[in-house]
Amino acid sequence: MGRPVCVTCGTQFADAEQPPATCPICTDPRQYVPPEGQRWTTLDELASSHGNAIRDEGDLVGIGTEPKFAIGQRALLVPFGATNLLWDCVTLLDDATAAEVERRGGLGAIAISHPHYYSAMVEWAHRFDCPIHLHADDAEWVMRPDPAIRRWRGEWLPLGDDLMLVRLGGHFRGGTVLYRAGGGGALLTGDIIQVIPDRSHVGFMWSYPNLVPLPAAEVRRMAAAVEGLAFEAIYGAWWGTVIPRDGKAIVRRSAERYVRALQTTPG
């Protein structure tokens, strides 16, 4: 079969004659296997029916697969010296996408918030000859091991050029956000901190599809971890999930609201 890709979460696995019986990322209770069961595809099959849209997203550039595939997140190109850092990842990497990314400066690194967006990260790393920065606490979820993967430890990792990875945990133990200093500051959160329809607040969950909350103490800890950062904008995981201003205050009051909701008896 080559390298099987899970249709539900978009994760690419290592070379195999037959796909695995199950996808460990989807059988984990933070994700799910759909009622019709586990299904697999390949990058070639995906490219025959899908393409990537590349367009402005706030002050950055987004890359998202159309029609929607798997979880449906979009990646972001973040200026990184003379090149770019790819924040989060999408499964599809075709020639047209690679050419457009090269036209915009290529990739100097890849960093990913959590395992649901690992997708085909190794394909991207090989195509652009760049490293992948993943938090070591989530190493068990790597389904295609590769020397391009660099596991970092601790609470933050400065990358240079005003970029820093910050471990927040929450959704996953190694859940990571990308902090971009300068210009008011921006926090790229994937769904470690979730941009929700009410743009005056954000959300925190252990499992989003299965609606499992986090403990109040964990949300307090996550909010405290970004309290020392100066940022206005928050970039979520999907097209249009951008909060352009007041991001730090929004995270603070959202955490306070979350804790109140868990501690208050419904009336």
Image (cartoon, rainbow, N blue to C red):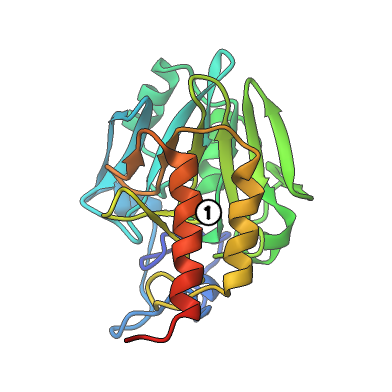
Residue furthest right in the image: 154
Where residue 13 appears, as percent x and y from the top left, is 54, 61
Along the line of sight, which residue is nearer the eye, 94 or 134?
134
Residue furthest front in the image: 267
Taking the image as shown, residue 53 lies to the left or right of residue 1, namely: left
Numbered label tally: 1
Where residue 125 appears, as percent x and y from the top left, is 57, 38
Looking at the picture, which amino acid does disc 1 mark? Tyr
At label 1, counting other C-alpha atoms closer than 10 Å, the crowd grade (few under 14, some 14-19, many 20 or more) is many
Q: Quadrant of residue 180?
A: top right
Q: Name the residue: 44% across, 64% down.
A: 257
Q: Name the residue: 56% across, 60% down.
A: 15
Where residue 96 appears, as percent x and y from the top left, is 32, 29
Image quarter hosting the C terminus: bottom left
Taking the image as shown, residue 72 lies to the left or right of residue 263, namely: left
Along the line of sight, which residue is nearer the eye, 87 or 264?
264
Image quarter hosting the N terminus: bottom left
Q: Secondary structure at mark 1?
A: loop
Can the viewer see residue 167 in this picture?
Answer: no
Q: Name the residue: 54% across, 18% down.
A: 83
Can the viewer see residue 10 in this picture?
Answer: yes
Taking the image as shown, residue 249 lies to the left or right of residue 45, namely: right
Q: Name the residue: 61% across, 44% down.
A: 227
Image position of 207 with respect to 188: above or below: below
User: Which residue position is annotated with label 1?
Assistant: 118
Image position of 13 with respect to 21: above or below: above
